[in-house]
Image: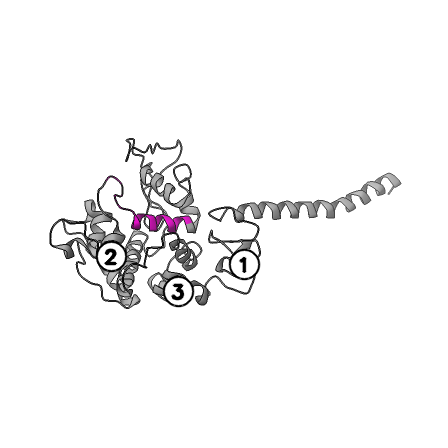
Amino acid sequence: MDSITTSVANKLRLKKPLMTTMLLLLLVMFTASVVDAACATSCSASMCCSSTGLCGPPKSVACGSNCISGPCTNEVTPYNVGLLGNYPLGRVVTLEMFDELFPARLRSFYSYEAFILAASAFPEFGTTGDVDMQKREVAAFLAHIQVETAGLSTIEARDTKDFCYLGVVEDISSACIAGKKYYPRGPMQLTWNYNYRRASDSIGEDLLAKPELVSENPAISFKTAFWVWMTPGLGLSKKPSSHAVMTQRSWSRSTAVESATGFGATINILKGETECGRASAQAEKRTAAYLRATEVLGVAPGHNLRC
């Protein structure tokens, strides 16, 4: 081998490790940018970003084994009962209860951690009234998401039409974004452009422009489900929220208050047009799921179980 060839070969050997190192650095940077996007918002330097899409301070559940960036630590795990039990919802439904009710769920997306922490954005959920009332409300919510998603085993509906309503709802323009579809997504199967718009205003994410976030980010997905539950006047209706009727706030002007509250009333609010006022196997599934949830949570189901 002549001296020129030897010199070139040596240079290539020197460059190979450098090129490999540069490629590895680029890969790490690219991976970090992807995983950081999992968080609902950009986490500050002092916060952890969890793979479930949540930001949290050091030693919080977000910094446990699911932590993907920030001051991660092994001192906690995402399902540390002592920590999650400090959240109101964590005292009503435990990880063991959640696992029992949703044994076949998509665990990588519908995690107990995301469920508990997303609920903290809606502080009245599962905290109104006495303990039995709180348990019944949570059981009712769990029953509906059980039926909507086949036990949290699906994220999106098979029907992927645009679901674009061209009118104006509550004087707020909810014009559909070109190329975007507003088909059912998430635990409560959020549907229609105007609901994506209203949910955006509540949870602080532009779901009208990025409806796919409901299918990609666990925290956002659960937050939309809680928004559906807590919000009166869903869609084009004038009905109260499911939260209201499960906490004994009647929406009827009659004296038959009990017939206007309870689990049956939530079916009417969420699915009245398609499942109430007639024989409905789907409505019966909801009632059966509610009875199962109350059994697991250890509370009597109460009155008015059907719509």
Which mark, by number, is residue 95? 3
- The percent position of residue 216, horizontal first and vertical second, equals 44, 47
Q: How dense is the environment of label 2, judged by Cα within 10 Å: few (below 14), some, or many (20 and up)?
A: many
Q: CA distance from mark 3 to mark 1?
A: 22 Å
At horizontal 39% and vertical 49% (from top left) the residue drawn is: 221
Residue closest to the far left:
255
Query: In the drawing, does residue 148 fall left or right of residue 303?
Result: right
- Pick whichever of labels 1 and 2 is earlier in the sequence: 1
- The percent position of residue 155, horizontal first and vertical second, equals 37, 49
Q: CA distance from mark 1 to mark 2?
A: 36 Å
Q: Is residue 290 above or below residue 158?
A: below
Quarter of the image for residue 111 reads bottom left
- The percent position of residue 33, horizontal first and vertical second, equals 56, 45
- Pick whichever of labels 2 and 3 is earlier in the sequence: 3
At horizontal 85% and vertical 43% (from top left) the residue drawn is: 6
Q: Which residues are magenta?
A: 220-236
Q: Which residue is mark 2?
A: 247
In the rendered structure, which amino acid carries the disc numbered 1? Pro
Q: Nearer the viewer, residue 46 or 302?
A: 46
In the rendered structure, which amino acid carries the disc numbered 2? Thr
**Circles 1, 2 touching at the beta carbon (< 8 Å):** no
Q: Is residue 6 in view? A: yes
Query: Which of pointers 2 and 3 indicates the residue nearer the eye?
Result: 2
At horizontal 23% and vertical 66% (from top left) the residue drawn is: 300
Q: CA distance from mark 2 to mark 3?
A: 24 Å
**Circles 3, 1 touching at the beta carbon (< 8 Å):** no
Query: In the drawing, does residue 196 fall left or right of residue 82?
Result: left
- Pick whichever of labels 3 and 1 is earlier in the sequence: 1
